[in-house]
Image (spheres, rainbow, N blue to C red):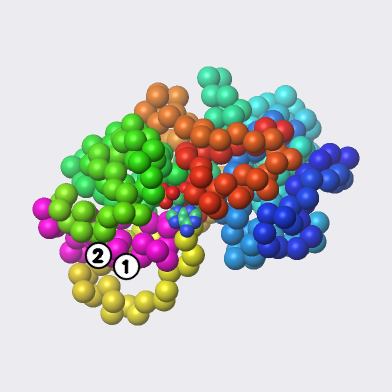
Amino acid sequence: MVKAIVMDQTGGPENMEWRDIEVGSPGAGEALVRHTVVGLNYIDTYMREGYYPQLKVPNAILGMEAAGVVEAVGEGVSDVAAGDRVTYVNGPGTYCEKRVLEARHLIKIPDGISDETAAAMMLQGMTAEYLLFRTHKVQAGDTILVQAAAGGVGLILCQWAKHLGATVIGTVSTEEKAELARANGCDHPILYTKENFAERVMEITSGKGVPVAYDAVGKDTFQGTFDSLSMRGHFVSYGQSSGGADPIAPGYLGAKSASLTRPSLFHYTSTREELVEVASNLIGVVQKGIVNIEIGQRYELKDAAQAHRDLHARKTVGSTVFTV
Ligand SMILES: NC(=O)c1ccc[n+]([C@@H]2O[C@H](COP(=O)([O-])OP(=O)(O)OC[C@H]3O[C@@H](n4cnc5c(N)ncnc54)[C@H](OP(=O)(O)O)[C@@H]3O)[C@@H](O)[C@H]2O)c1
């Protein structure tokens, strides 16, 4: 038996229960991993609430990301072996002390990267990678908009885009978050809780707007993000922390020949080859110090419900991890 955060019904954090579960042994193609650190991501709250349907209650375990040590592997597994330090994105099912999963999801953690950094960076960092290089190729000289710039994905996007030579405009809810975003490559933090951010984007870009806007806030920012785009701008809607945006008709985009994408990390890392490529690019920039993984909060895994409350209440900055 090991401990896990288990849900018997979807809903609020009060439905997250710390209790014993059974762990099997790895079958063909699988590995048993003892988690040392588990990552918290906003997607965990969508699954907890049932907004995304992947959490199959009862006896369902939340969580999409973790790091730890391989304890055993099943037949046919050659990429990892017992004793390897590994990290991965796969779930739901990571809010637990040990887990059996398909070994093809595992990435070995190189020396010099701690388990804590690995568990904090994989989902948010691989997201930043595909957003900046695959969904839209950000070029030196571009001015881009990043919503929720002091969040987990936000801080990584700011640093990496800045390294690529972009000018980064970012939105945040507080002065403290503005300072943090600025320290992480955001040239123009805007307090969207106080200012009309679309007007500020137009001022900063001398009325041109941005060629790409990354918006995972959703409902509250959708119109302003659209208003911030340049002619033929690219609206990358990759999440909905404030709730899902209202539907729009295709003709809406015609006002500026804009394009709208709704990408998901899982569609950019579905083959082993793609996963290894995206993960390696992320690991490379972290090893070189180009991207620093800012861990703003740490909780014990048994206190995951409190972390969910804090994330939802916009109290967190950067990435959040659970120690196991
Ligand atoms: N599509 C994908 O592949 C993909 C992958 C990873 C993440 N995502 C999405 O990216 C977003 C960021 O994920 P994350 O894990 O890095 O979370 P996060 O950005 O650390 O946390 C969410 C942030 O959103 C902002 N926010 C604005 N309105 C909010 C509201 N009404 N309620 C709560 N937060 C609000 C808050 O920042 P302020 O206080 O500054 O407003 C909050 O800190 C999420 O929407 C997530 O689902 C998508």
**Position of 62 relative to 278 (above/below):** below
Which amino acid does the dot numbered 2 rest on?
Asp
In-front residue for pair 108/38: 38
Task: Using the rendered view, name the quadrant where residue 249 is placed.
Answer: bottom left
**Position of 204 relative to 199 (above/below):** above
Circle 1: element type: helix
- Residue that sits furthest to the left in the current view: 206
Coordinates of residue 195 in the picture (x, y in percent): 27, 55
Drawn side of residue 141 relative to residue 34, left or right: left
Q: Which residues are magenta?
A: 206-233
Local packing at callout 1 (Cα closer than 10 Å; few below 14, some 14-19, many 20+) is few
Which amino acid does the dot numbered 1 rest on?
Gln
- Residue lying at 45% horizontally and 44% vertically, measured from the top left: 151
Residue marked by disc 2: 227
CB of mark 1 within 8 Å of CB of mark 2?
yes
Quadrant that contains the C terminus: top right
Residue marked by disc 1: 223
Q: Is residue 159 magenta?
A: no
Task: Using the rendered view, name the quadrant where residue 68 is placed.
Answer: top right
Quadrant that contains the N terminus: top right
Coordinates of residue 188 in the picture (x, y in percent): 25, 43
- Residue lying at 14% horizontally and 57% vertically, measured from the top left: 208
- Residue lying at 27% horizontally and 73% vertically, measured from the top left: 253
**Residue 159 visible, this angle:** no
**Position of 223 relative to 263 (above/below):** below
**Residue 17 visible, this angle:** yes
